[in-house]
Amino acid sequence: MPKATIQGLSFLAVVTAVTAAFVWLLLPYYGAILWAVILAILFNPLHRRLETWLGGHRNLAAAVSVLACICIVVIPGAAILASLAQEAASLYNRISTREFDLATLFGQIQSALPPLIERALSTLNLGDFVEIRTRLTSFLMQLSQEVATRAFSIGQNTAQFFVSLGVMLYLLFFLFRDGRQLAGMMRNASPLSGRYTDYIFGKFTSVVTATVKGNVIIAAIQGGIGGIAFWMLGIEAALLWGVLMAFLSLLPAIGAALVWAPAGIYYLVTANYLKGAILLAVGVLVISTIDNILRPALVGRGTRLPDYVVLISTVGGLSLIGMNGFVIGPLIAALFVAVWSLFTEEQLHS
């Protein structure tokens, strides 16, 4: 083997090993780094305008952009998290102490439904109303306890939380200030051709924007409207159900209807027709149509993946990674589609 080849392979091995070691070093704060990159992409248009308005003072523009991120994202997110933890803990305590009596609710539903429904439940092997009540009670207790535990764990790990937050904001400042230079360095260092590198970078940016700016904003609006409707109708733990609707809105073909539809049906079968009609009308006419109205403007048709790909990649990301998976899952899927599209194009023209 020629000496030049040996040196080239050795250098490639060193680059690979050092890069792997650096990635391993960053793993404890991958979430902070991920969200710094996401916020830098989302707020980049604002930062560019600020840089122009401030006469090209990059440091000042970056500082103001970070402050905007804190006011728009960090503070509201922390407030919602604290309220969610409190409400989930309250719901768990009320269910465990039987202050929130599910037996009475199911008794009302059972007395309002015709015998045909009970026979259908038995035919489908779903059990009788006692079994369904037991399962639902267990589900509500597990859900509220899980939400409260996860939210409180953030508060208990206050030092780790603030270190991660500090890392995110510190990195965010430099991404705002030096983002264009860093992107140029990465483009020059890429072993791919300029066209392929630009295409993959563009796909990365568009998917992050579509997933966060589009899907999260739409989910937040749907969950917010659902939570307000629940609160106005006097339903227990309206904030918790609103957050759950927002979370389910991220999943195509499932959606927030898994929460508001059963609640509306409950009101109808218990003869509370006005509340049931209002809730179902809000769900069908407002919550379910928001996606079709806002998604083209916020996401754009060109960045959308097929719904089944989004569903599978989102659920897979959440299962493997946790909450960050709702971004990383679709991002990996989009990059997979982009890379294989480039590979297919290369094969057709070779």
Image (spheres, rainbow, N blue to C red):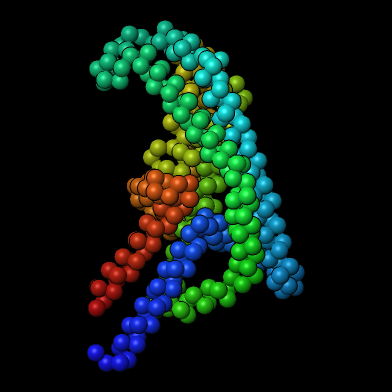
Can you say whether 59 is above or below 323 in the image?
A: below
**In terms of image quadrants, where is residue 257?**
top left
Q: On the rendered structure, is 67 left or right of 309?
A: right
Q: Residue at x 53, y 77 (%)?
A: 184
Q: Quadrant of the N terminus?
A: bottom left
Q: On the rendered structure, is 209 left or right of 231?
A: left
Q: Residue at x 43, y 23 (%)?
A: 138
Percent across and percent down for residue 194 are: 43, 78
Q: Quadrant of the C terminus?
A: bottom left
Total numbered labels placed on residues in the image: 0
Q: Residue at x 40, y 43 (%)?
A: 252
Percent across and percent down for residue 208 are: 49, 58
Q: Residue at x 70, y 71 (%)?
A: 58
Can you say whether 14 is above or below 221 in the image?
A: below
Percent across and percent down for residue 60 are: 74, 67
Can you say whether 62 is above or below 187 in the image?
A: above
85 or 50: nearer the viewer: 85
Question: Is residue 180 in view?
Answer: yes
Percent across and percent down for residue 278 are: 54, 23
**In terms of image quadrants, where is residue 79?**
top right
Question: Is residue 42 in view?
Answer: no
161 or 67: nearer the viewer: 161
Can you say whether 2 is above or below 57 in the image?
A: below
307 or 64: nearer the viewer: 64
